[in-house]
Image (cartoon, helix red, strand yellow):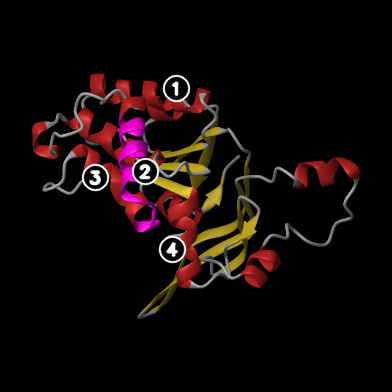
Amino acid sequence: MLEQDSWANHRRGPVGSLERPAEALAAASPPVVQMVGVNKVYPLPEGSFQALYDIDLAIQPGEYCAIMGPSGSGKSTLMNLIGCLERPSSGRYWLDGVEVSTLTDRDLAHIRNQKIGFVFQQFHLLPVLTALENVMLPLAYAGIPEPEQRRRAKQALEQVGLGSKLQQRPAQLSGGQQQRVAIARAIVNRPHLLLADEPTGALDSHTGQEVLNLFAELHRQGITLVVVTHDLKVAQAAQRIIRVGDGRLLD
């Protein structure tokens, strides 16, 4: 868990501006994602490679955004930074008002568990566990008592339309159903941000549309959703498309 002093220090938003009453009101509900001047550089044996340049990005609570770009554009790196899977080389990043760009690995792991739900192209379900047990895993890592784990996992599976599949293992489920289990697992901790990486990439078009319909319903329920994709159809389901090219935001 974040130490109290560390938490207080990292609660501050961008510095260097005078705060007016309207800004003070906005500070009470900060962007879920706010990046200022973020760069990402990877060291290489022959030098270095810069994947992202001077990223300024804000995603508000309740937004449904798509990050779109071709392979090599930097969108996967941006996703990894948003998801606290990597750190910026420079610049500052606040997640839900907490500056995470300088947190310890332990604090980042806590942030990921408590504030972010992840959905991947490959479902990453444990084959020996039932749907219910797979969805319970994030709650177990968070130290939630088992009866509460089961109640919340069952509720999340019902929310994605799989209330009758609690005891099925992944091999007994279709691809679309497995992705729904993965989405239930991502939302069971009631995250502030749902981050999906090519969530329809392993599905046929009909099943992929069902997943997009589910995302639209989750968005209507108030979840902040960011989908990373190269598929224009998937991106057009979002409220806003964030285009990335050659490591820069294009618009």
Give the crowd class for mark 3: few <14, some 14-19, many >=20 residues within 10 Å: many
Residue 144 drawn in magenta: yes
Task: Kindly identify which residue carries mark 3.
Answer: 134
Tell me where residue 206 appears, x and y as whole percent.
Answer: 24, 19
Label 2 to label 4: alpha-carbon separation: 22 Å
Task: Kindly identify which residue carries mark 2.
Answer: 148
Earlier residue among tags 2 and 4? 4
Which stretch is magenta? 141-157
Q: Quadrant of residue 185?
A: top left
Say what amino acid the circle numbered 2 marks.
Glu
Task: Kindly identify which residue carries mark 4.
Answer: 109
Earlier residue among tags 1 and 3? 3
Q: Quadrant of the C terminus?
A: top right
Q: Of discs 1 and 3, which sits in the foreground?
A: 3
Q: Quadrant of residue 160?
A: top left
Label 1 to label 4: alpha-carbon separation: 28 Å
